[in-house]
Image (cartoon, rainbow, N blue to C red):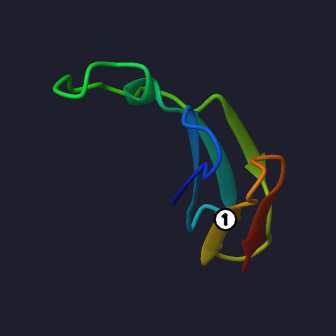
Amino acid sequence: MCFAPKKMGFFVSASQDNTIKVWADPSAHAESSSLVEINSATMTVMAHQKYINVVRVSPNDKLIASAS
């Protein structure tokens, strides 16, 4: 999992189902003491044919890189 470094508002995850998911981060706009439930990803991409071991967001938040 990797949070966007430049602006708050999204993070990405990768998993053993070979997908990368982009999630909205509503806690970036919520009060600091609030708990926020996230139910679904805003985008899911089948990214590799094998497990994805790492995912990163570029410093300008425009690219997502992954490695399998």
> In the rendered image of this protein, does residue 8 appear above or below residue 29?
below
Mark 1 lies on residue: 56
For label 1, the crowd category at 10 Å Cα-Cα, with few meaning under 14, some 14 to 19 and many 20 or more, is many
Residue type, numbered disc 1: Arg
Q: In the image, residue 49 lies at what x, y percent?
A: 79, 72
The furthest residue to the left: 33
Q: In the image, residue 2 lies at what x, y percent?
A: 55, 58
* Among the 4 quarters of the image, the one containing residue 51: bottom right
Residue closer to the observer: 7 or 44: 7
Residue closer to the observer: 5 or 63: 5
Which element is circle 1 on?
Answer: strand
* Among the 4 quarters of the image, the one containing residue 57: bottom right
> In the rendered image of this protein, does residue 53 appear above or below residue 36?
below
* Among the 4 quarters of the image, the one containing residue 65: bottom right
In the rendered image, the quadrant that contains the C terminus is bottom right
Total number of numbered labels? 1
Q: Residue at x 29, y 25 (%)?
A: 36
Residue closer to the observer: 17 or 28: 28
Q: Residue at x 60, y 78 (%)?
A: 53
Q: Residue at x 76, y 60 (%)?
A: 58
Q: In the image, residue 11 lies at what x, y percent?
A: 56, 45
Q: Residue 41 vs residue 29: left or right?
A: right
Q: In the image, residue 64 lies at what x, y percent?
A: 77, 57
